[in-house]
Image: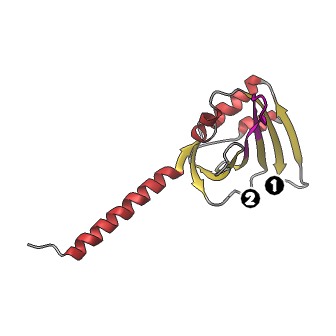
Amino acid sequence: MKINKKYIVVIIIVCIIAVFEIVHRSQMNTSFKKVVLDRLNGTEITSIHITRTSVSVDPYEEKEIVVTDKHVINNIINDFSEIKLRKSRNHDFNPNESYHYIMHIEVDRPRVSSLRFGMTVYDKKNISIFDYDNRKNKYNSYKITNEFSPDSLENVFK
């Protein structure tokens, strides 16, 4: 029994598209550890600048704090290190969240800017990360795919 060549071509094309889709989707899934912590290359974090801005709180409020205490920095980084991420094109953040947190991570680097990463935590499910050292792909938006609570950030303001 002969198989029509058109069917073979269609099957091959479908398989190629499926492989590309699987590869594309696997590249979209990542983690905070891969995106931020692994890129620090063992460089010590010297400070985290955190700005809390009100979103649904009236009147508008903005508070800023600089964290230099190593124990507090480690608590924040440990909370974030478990975050699983998926690349996203937009921010579908929850408008009922009270605050956004804008963070800037500084590291100990002589003769180079100490700013290494900037992040905005929109809510429990959305974050954007800015990599100051990446020349091509500095800014990416992500969906947080596992349970996350920005309590360690909120505790800094108490």
User: Residue 95: percent from the left, percent from the top?
Assistant: 74, 58
Q: Which residues are magenta?
A: 104-119
Mark 2 Cα shell of 10 Å, populated few (<14), some (14-19), many (≥20): few
Q: In this rendering, would 2 be left or right of 132?
A: left
Snapshot quadrant of residue 101: top right
Q: Residue at x 81, y 56 (%)?
A: 56
Q: Is residue 129 above or below residue 21?
A: above
Residue type, label 1: Val
Q: Is residue 89 above or below residue 43?
A: below
Using the numbered discs, state the Cα–Cα distance from disc 1 to disc 2 in whole angstroms.
7 Å
Which residue is labeled 1 in the image?
Answer: 55
Note whether residue 46 is visible. yes
Q: Residue at x 59, y 43 (%)?
A: 147
Upstream in the sequence, badge 1 or badge 2?
1
Mark 1 Cα shell of 10 Å, populated few (<14), some (14-19), many (≥20): some
Q: Quadrant of the C terminus?
A: top right
Residue at the farthest front position: 111
Q: Is residue 111 magenta?
A: yes
Which residue is labeled 2 in the image?
Answer: 95
